[in-house]
Image (cartoon, helix red, strand yellow):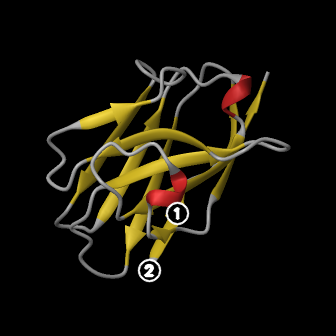
Amino acid sequence: QLQASGGGLVQAGGSLRLSCASSRRTFMNMGWFRQAPGKEREFVAAITRSGATTYYADSVKGRFTISRDNAKNTLYLQMSSVKFEDTAIYYCAAGAAAGNVLSNEYDYWGQGTLVTVSS
């Protein structure tokens, strides 16, 4: 149901935009998580159904922006000033309460898209 895309290789300090397309109208709270090699999946950002309220992990606050276009059934994550430690597989998710940072509270997941930051 959720298809993440937009990952790739980016230099440190650069920018990248991830997208998460839904095959149908997804009027749910949504979020982005990431998982680096050898680490647990962690919360990155979340957005409410309407897009009016957003939440961010401290590690990405001020650098990443989550947004959504409900008309296009698409969720976005604009990544700027990326750092080497942002290297991970990024997953989009849907279905939890607004701003929930726990991955097991989300009902639907995309397949993940790999972001690699070169130093």
45 or 99, which is in the foreground? 99
Q: Label 1 crowding class (10 Å Cα cut-off): few <14, some 14-19, many 20+?
A: many
> At x 35% / y 58%, what residue is drawn?
96
Residue 60, relative to residue 7: is it above or below? above
The percent coordinates of residue 116 (x first, y second) are: 74, 40
> At x 53% / y 31%, what residue is drawn?
15
> At x 61% / y 19%, what residue is drawn?
13
Q: Which residue is mark 1?
A: 4
The percent coordinates of residue 49 (x first, y second) are: 19, 56
> At x 54% / y 60%, what residue is drawn?
5
Secondary structure found at label 2: loop
* Lateral position of residue 59 relative to residue 46, left or right: right
The percent coordinates of residue 95 (x first, y second) are: 35, 65
Q: Residue farthest to the right?
A: 38
Nearest to viewer (mark 2 / mark 1) = 2
Q: Which image quadrant for residue 1?
A: bottom left
* Lateral position of residue 33 relative to residue 37, left or right: left
* Lateral position of residue 104 relative to residue 45, left or right: right
Q: Are marks 2 and 1 in contact (CB under 8 Å)?
A: no
Q: How many marks?
A: 2
Q: Which mark is residue 101?
A: none
101 or 62, which is in the foreground? 101
- Point out the image quarter for the C terminus: top right
Tell me the amino acid under the disc marked 1.
Answer: Ala
Secondary structure found at label 1: strand
Residue 86, relative to residue 73: is it above or below? above
Q: Which mark is residue 1?
A: 2
98 or 84, which is in the foreground? 98
39 or 74, which is in the foreground? 39
Q: Label 2 crowding class (10 Å Cα cut-off): few <14, some 14-19, many 20+?
A: few
Tell me the amino acid under the disc marked 2.
Answer: Gln
